[in-house]
Amino acid sequence: MDSAGSSYAIETINLTKIFPDWWGRPKVKAVVDLNLKVRYNEIYGFLGPNGSGKTTTIKMLLNLLHPTKGHAFVLGGRSTDPAIAARIGYLPEESYLYRYLTARETLDFYGRIFGLPASVRKSRIDTLLEMVGLAGLGSRRIGTYSKGMMRRIGLAQALINDPDLLILDEPTSGMDPIGTRQIKDLLLELARRGKTILLCSHLLADVEDVCDRIGIMYGGKMQVEGPVRELLQHRDELQILTGPLPPKAREEIESVVRREGSWCKITTPVDKLETFFVNIITKAQETQPTSGAKPGTGIQGFLAAQPASPSRAVLEQLVAKKPQPVSESSADRAKTEPTEAVPPSAPKKELLEHLTEKPVEKTVSAEAQTEKPSEPPAVPKPAVRQDILEKLLGGRKGPDGSTEQTRLPDSEERRDAE
């Protein structure tokens, strides 16, 4: 299937996944005959309770699981194709990140996986950290982040390759209401920039705010699918919003409605708690500093430069094309990657001789003094008694020069020993 001839960013045909038991017999029917169609440039809400088959479907789309039967196509092809996989950004339900890396090192690591040049990685890292509200926390280790901050850096990791398709599994899990609102605004802006987003979430209020269409799974099967407004609209009721009315006008409206054979209920509008919370925090941020995550700055940098419609040529230029070593300037490499220390220039020969000449002379003179000390005056040697020497040698010399062994009496031996 070619992406040029496909009108769907995601399409499944009778997709089925059955997990067998120990004996190979069908045990769990996770997904059954799923026919899912997600158009380009839309946000699709993939909903359902725990165990309904959502995560299993996502894993089959990403080729992390092989389907029992059926087919799954992504961006007009299969995710087994490296060119297709390079155009997908994925945020799993649990962020499996290296805890001892900082946020910048994490994004740099994933940028290297996609083959991004050093200069491109640096600019994108700065842009993404600012966008998700972690600009001041980029040098902290991931292991010190809260769960909501982990989701922020996980979303930045999913965007590092500037993907055409974003698959997000619980992107706002563990986030505070401010972070949740920022992520929702970010997703809406990404869709306006031409991205296709598959959003899987249990927070139905978030899905209602951002999704164009939704599909609800249960028992591995699609139960209902369609635009959010059409599915949630009450077709047998009307809603009238007006400004302040005096009591007499309200009574007249109620009487008119009752005269038409219907019912009427007039109440005062109430804001959502999320809206109220965001308004309070926004006012506090103007004067109160914080050491936690800060508000993001919205779409900017390489994401803001993208056209409104998906373009494969642009993506191939940014992602699929391998970096050429000669294309990077020496200034970019010096700013982004560590360089080996350059040895200093060699000193002049005359200076070297001047610095080493005197210490050598001193050393030689010192050695000369040490090796050849002044001889002390000769001291006359004392005369040696011949009889004592013979006793020490244990014998007397004969006429021929040989030594005769003699044994002294025991008394003499004891006296000599004493």
Image: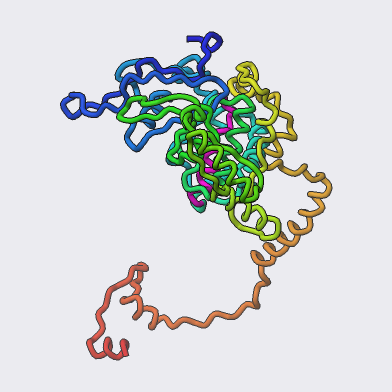
Seen at 32% across and 71% down, the residue is 403
Q: Looking at the rendering, in which quadrant would you find the C terminus?
A: bottom left
Q: Nearer the viewer, residue 345 or 290?
A: 290
- Tell me if residue 357 comes above or below residue 83 in the rendering: below
What residue do we see at 49% from left, 21% from top?
38
The foreground one among 363 and 98 is: 98
Q: Confirm whether residue 222 shows in the render.
A: yes
| Residue at the (66%, 48%) spot, across then down | 244
- Residue at the outermost left position: 23
**Horizontal side, residue 88 vs residue 285: left or right:** left
Q: Which residue is drawn at 63% across and 58% down?
A: 290
Magenta span contains residue 165: no
In the rendered image, residue 154 lying in the magenta stretch gets the answer: yes
**Residue furthest right in the image:** 350
Q: In which quarter of the image is residue 191?
A: top right
Name the one closer to the observer, 57 or 188.
188
Residue 234: x %, y % from top left: 47, 32
Q: Measured from the top left, where is residue 368 in percent x and y? A: 69, 63
Q: Residue 74, position in %: x, y?
A: 47, 19
Extent of the magenta region = 146-164
Secondary structure, magenta segment, majority class: helix
